[in-house]
Image (cartoon, rainbow, N blue to C red):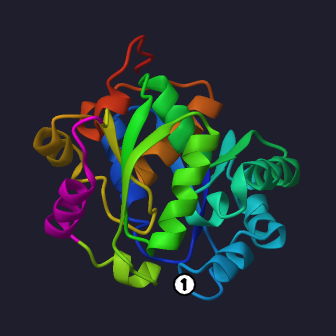
Amino acid sequence: MTALGFLYPGHSAEDDYPRIEQLLGSDIRVDLVHTDIGEDAHRVDALLRMGAPERLAAGVEELRLAGAEAVVWACTSGSFVYGWDGAREQVQNLATAAGLPASSTSFAFVHAASELGLRRVAVAATYPEDVAGLFSEFLRAGGVEVTAVRGAGIITAAEVGTWGETEILELARAADTPDAQALLLPDTALHTAAHIPTLEKDLGKPVLTANQVTVWEALRLADRRVNAPALGALFSREPLVQV
C-alpha cells in the first residue's frame, strides 16, 4: 500500500480525491487533510495568507501519523502566488515540517508538462485575469511557454466548486489555441476528475487539471507510476508499475 498525503484548502472539490483513488485501481491510498482557507478569495493578499507556513504545518502531523509517504500542498494559486523561488521555499518548509518529500500543485503542473514533453500550453483558469497571469508567469519560469491564458474572473473557490462539465468545456474551448500542445485547468477548487476523457476528446490534446496533477505529483514523489487511462494522457505513460 502506497499512502499519499494532501493538504487541501477549505472545501470545494475535495471529492475529486476519492474519485481519483478509485480510478487508480491499485494499492494507492489517498489521505486528505483540510487546511484553514482564511478568506475565500482569489486575491493576491488572501492567497499569500492561505499558503502561509503555519497554515500548512498545522495539517502535516495527521498525514504523517496516517503513514503518508509524500505530501503535496493541493493548491495552485496558494503556491504560484509566491513566485518560483517563494513557492520552492514553501515546499521546502513543508518538507521540513512533515519530514517527508513535499511539493505543491504549481510544481506538479511543471513536472507533468515535462513528463509529457510539452513545451507550449494554453491556460483555462477560473481565476481573475491578474491571478491567472501569475500562473502563466510561474509556468514560464519553469520553462513552459504559454500560448494563451483565459481567466473566468471568479473570486471564490466556493463558486468554482459549483461548476460542471458544461462550464468547464466552455472555458477550455475559449482558452485553447491551435499551437498549444495541451490545455491546463489550474484550480483545485474545480471538479475535473470525471471530465478529463471528455475534455481530451473534445480538444484533441492532453488536458492537465489541478487535482489530477496533484495526485500524479504525489505518486512521483513516492516513486510510483500507475496506469489509469480514465485520468487522461498523463496517466497513460510507459513504463508502468501496476498491481
Is residue 76 in view from this perspective?
no
The amino acid pointed to by label 1 is Ala
Q: Kindly identify the residue that appears in the image at 13 percent across and 67 percent down.
A: 166
Q: Kindly identify the residue that appears in the image at 57 percent across and 42 percent down.
A: 140
Give left or right: position of 137 versus 24. Answer: right
Q: Name the one closer to the observer, 7 or 22.
A: 7
Q: Kindly identify the residue that appears in the image at 73 percent across and 66 percent down.
A: 59
Residue 28 % position (x, y):
48, 38
Residue 236 % position (x, y):
32, 24
Q: Name the one closer to the observer, 99 or 195.
A: 195
Q: Which residues are magenta?
A: 164-179
- What SS does tag 1 mark? loop
Q: Kindly identify the residue that appears in the image at 24 percent across and 56 percent down.
A: 172
Q: Dominant secondary structure of the magenta stretch?
A: helix
Q: Quadrant of residue 102?
A: top right
Q: Find out whether residue 17 is within the magenta segment.
A: no
Give left or right: position of 35 versus 109. Answer: right
Q: Quadrant of residue 100?
A: top right
Q: Residue lying farthest bottom?
A: 39
Residue 136 % position (x, y):
52, 53
Q: Name the one closer to the observer, 163 or 205.
A: 205
Q: Quadrant of residue 202?
A: top left
Q: Residue lying farthest top?
A: 239
Is the residue 221 above or below the residue 79 in the image? above
Is residue 166 in view from this perspective?
yes
Q: Find out whether residue 176 is within the magenta segment.
A: yes
Is the residue 97 above or below the residue 108 in the image? below
Quadrant where the C terminus sits is top left
Quadrant where the N terminus sits is top right
Counting labels gives: 1
- Identify residue for label 1: 41
How busy is the neighbourhood of tag 1: few (under 14 within 10 Å), some, or many (20 plus)? some
